[in-house]
Image (cartoon, helix red, strand yellow):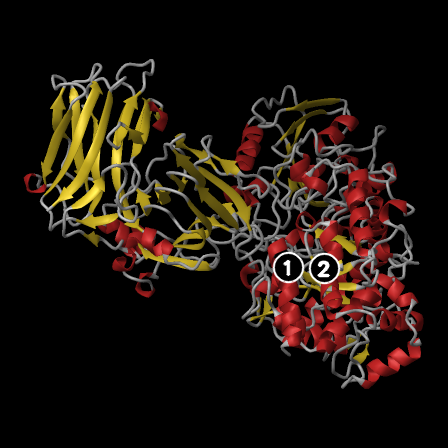
Amino acid sequence: MYVSRRLKLKALSTMMIVAALTACSSDSNDNDGNDGPGTPDPVAGVDYINTFSDWPAIQSAIAKDPQIEARIVEIMATMSLEEKVGQMIQPELQHLTPEEVKQYHIGSVLNGGGSWPGTKKHATVQEWLDIADALWEASMDDSDGAAAIPIIWGTDAVHGHSNVVGATLFPHNIGLGAARDSDLIRRIGAATAKEVAVTGIDWTFAPTLAVVRDDRWGRTYEGYSEDGEIIFNYGAAMVEGLQGNFDQSHVVATAKHFIGDGGTEKGNDQGDNLADQNTLINLHGQGYYSALRAGAQTVMASFNSWQGEKLHGRKDLLTDVLKGKMGFDGLIVSDWNGIGQVDGCTESNCPQAVNAGIDLFMVPYKADWKAFYQNTIDSVNAGAIDIERINDAVARILRVKLRAGLFDKPKPSQRALAGKVEVLGSSEHRELAREAVRKSLVLLKNKDGILPLSRDARILVAGKSADSLSNQSGGWTISWQGTGLDEAEDFPGATSILKGIQDVAANVTYDADGADANPNLHDVAIVVIGETPYAEGVGDLEGAKTLEHARNYSQDLAVLESIRNAGVPVVTVFLSGRPLYVNKELNRSNAFVAAWLPGSEGEGVADVLFAKAEGGVNHDFVGKLSFSWPNSACHTPLNKGDGSDALFAYGYGLSYQDSDSLGDDLSEESQAFGCDQTDPGDGGTTNVNLDLFTSGQNQGDWVMRIGGPSNWGGTPVSMDPAVTTALEGNEVSVSTEDGAIQFSAKRVKWTDVGQVYMQATEDSEGKDLTPYYNSKTTVKFRVKVNEAPAGDVNLSLHCVYPCLGEVAVGDFMRGLPVGEWTEVSIPFQCFVDDGLDFSNVNTPFLLYSGGAMDLSLENIRWEPNTAADTPDCSSFAQENVALTETTEVYTDGVTDTELFAQPGVWAVSSWDPYQEDASFVSLDAALADGAGTVVDAQYGAPAAEHAAKGVVLFKSAKPLNVSALSKLTFDVKVIDFAASTGLMAKVNCGADCGTGDIAILDSTAALNVWHPVEINFADYDGLNTAEVTSVLEILPVWDSEMRNVHFQVDNVRLVK
């Protein structure tokens, strides 16, 4: 047992400490971790009850232990406020060092999805243990006189220890719900706990107890059912399996997310649950009643709101209900930066959430948790948080650690299962997962009894998911979203569905697209199709999306049609995280199996599809739908008992003994717009958002790209949160960060000229978006300025370049507060007024910067019917600087950097393919020539004649109004005309505005001599002197050879 020296030297008896703390208390419940008022209803018992009139009292299987309670009092009596607040903080693994654990007395750590020791995806078990030991040892170091309190490490082991390569991956909860087997759930919990313990981790954020009411929700697969009874039965079973008796083969469980996360309007992740309290109690509360009765020690607060108020700030539910009426005496942990969504809070400062009853704060990022630490201390000292609330939180944290035996366990690497790699992904656990796969399968169609299949049949296996461990495992697998994985390297020991079939059947051909289907060669085709991985936020079917699988994944239907048209019978195995509208797929299938997201043991599918070698059923289908199945693209919400006509009702599932009369003529009616939208073509107007980049993902056909001098052709930006995309020249780079939700924003850094934009393809044809023009549309996005722009910034919409409409937003961006999110709205009309052809749009968003800038962007979209509520175009106009006197632009260097940019270059090295390359012109903007400095431009010598072109630019930092001036003068000296026929110059005022090219010297002009040049503004009708953006652009004659030309420029002036 590890006890600090301060505790050993303590003279006061436990009873005296108790008496002292009680005397300071204004409420008998304070400091005992049982804070909260209210008279509870009768205790919720073992049986499922959905007729409560109020929140029931829960009698936990883990009763209060007087020795533990005395120990809590003893420890807390030695702790300073700083130590207590440190115990309440849970940073993310990558944002915490052992030294900081000791310095700030940190109580907990988590590793988020896709976070591994040293950021190594393939970290060994020993590497997991090494960091666990380091953090534990730091927490137990009492050399500074602070209390030695073991840190507790939490992880998202939500379908097995799914963040660790090589672990057993069990079916996701939606599949387990179909199994209707509580004992199976208990055994899965116990197996998961053992694998978590192998890596030295103490705590898993499971089970999820969401009652899912709208299948558009991207976390539907994390829920066991749409009905509370299955969740009630499973909540206790999973907690019992995970926690056991808290020996060294078990871990702490979490009941999450309290409460109502599965019932938000339209299935919006982190949205608003508008249910009445009776529904909250008797539907959404069911899993908590059984999980808490089974002894769940932690509860995670939910991101969602209830009736407009975020759960993270609701004292009435967290304290009055959960801790009070329900009697929960464990700890409440916040979700990832969830406190930042509470009104009046940020990720680093939220007294409201502390006062509401959250005990442990998941504040992952270093800057935020350090600020939260100090802000919370300051709030206590200022009286905004009562010290008794802090004491209650710390008492609960200590109670969980003591009950879990963390004070008695040795360091992580010395525990019973630590380092036992044979337990991680063991054959015993994989066999259990295989059993779970078998029991989770639901047979929806079996025309003419085509199943089970003979092992001697000639089998064609097709579909994108047949040999995809990523697709069969889904989100929360190795990475947060389950994306960006290597099939060969990231799933050791796992078995794809294809491999499972090959192990059973004697004659198997694999052809992913089914193009070679032939009834003379194949008796039957097993086609494995479905959704691809996603997790929270990203997985929501929002905007223009519906439940129609054929619309979301058209290639799947194409494979089915190809095989069916070839005359080969089709058995479809459908992988999905929710029920979907699949009438088209059903009509093209002889048999159809809902396989959900089965995880690492794909052979469980073949166990049921195939008969025994000698004939007869090997394993029958026993799975029954725990979700109702939709009959149209927008058949949602759809739930048991709501009177809706589901295609397959809750509880449906055929066995081999059942006959099937479904047929092949189901309605195939489709819908080309979202479930809460009207037809965008109706009357030439629309109310449908044109979503471009939302929830951290590209939307529709639109792809985020970056471009710059090293590749103006465009580089697609990875949507994988772990990947940073950068141009070859690093002019622009893009990484992922948290925005309104986790990983929903892209941080774009410019070091030079470059752009970020949304476009369908690199050579995309334009789309007719006239309905948006007719619907008073606004271009909207959220932006956070991390570093203000150094030069011009333009937002443009393109109608196949050079057709575009543009708004200068540099001054606007410079005026935004640094580090704060702002919603930007610009009327569509502004772009139309500047030249946009709305009937031919191919790039609906392009943000260009002329220099260094650092922005974070999210939620980029066009929103119709909002222009009346947005600023007019003049609000974004750059402030033109009026020059009324002769002004030096460049004389021995740039004279005024506030007005004029440093001389630069635009150059292209190839036209087919188009490739900008500034290196073609070697520019020295301050070459010493003995009398001062000049601009020296030397053109290169690429191999191809006439291909390379380059222009030397003297741009203004802001638009200039030079109407009071008469001309531009400068001196030019040619060192070598090479093969060029002369030099040209121009003054520009934006796209299609300027003097045009003006011949200033021909190739007969004397070399190495300064030639004075002047351009009189009055001679050029195309020049708008009130909007000058480029004071001087100089180049060799465009149609002549530019290679090896060498010239210098000096004494550039705007003259009155």
Helix, strand or loop at mark 2? helix
Q: Which residue is mark 1?
A: 370
Q: Position of residue 629 (x, y in %)?
A: 62, 53
- Nearer to me, 76 or 418: 76
Residue positioned 33% across, 16% down in the render: 942
Q: Is 313 placed left or right of 933 in the picture?
A: right
Q: Position of residue 755 (x, y in %)?
A: 39, 40
Q: Is 212 placed left or right of 881 in the picture?
A: right
In the rendered structure, find residue 104 and report the number of the disc placed on it: 2
> Local crowd at mark 1 within 10 Å, few (<14), some, or many (≥20)?
some
Residue positioned 56% across, 53% down in the render: 738
> Local crowd at mark 2 within 10 Å, few (<14), some, or many (≥20)?
some
**Mark before the other along the chain sequence, 1 or 2:** 2
Residue type at mark 2: give it. Answer: Tyr
Q: Is 398 placed left or right of 597 in the picture?
A: right
In the rendered structure, find residue 832 and report the number of the disc placed on it: none
Q: CA distance from mark 1 to mark 2?
A: 8 Å
Helix, strand or loop at mark 1? helix
Q: Quadrant of residue 686?
A: bottom left
Q: Quadrant of residue 729?
A: top left
Residue positioned 72% across, 80% down in the render: 53
- Nearer to me, 561 or 68: 68
Q: Is residue 794 above or below residue 50?
A: above
- Nearer to me, 51 or 687: 687
Q: Can residue 64 be seen at all in this image of the molecule?
A: no
Q: Is residue 859 above or below residue 114?
A: below
Q: Is 47 placed left or right of 307 in the picture?
A: right
Q: Position of residue 433 (x, y in %)?
A: 80, 42
Tags 1 and 2 touching, CB below 8 Å: yes
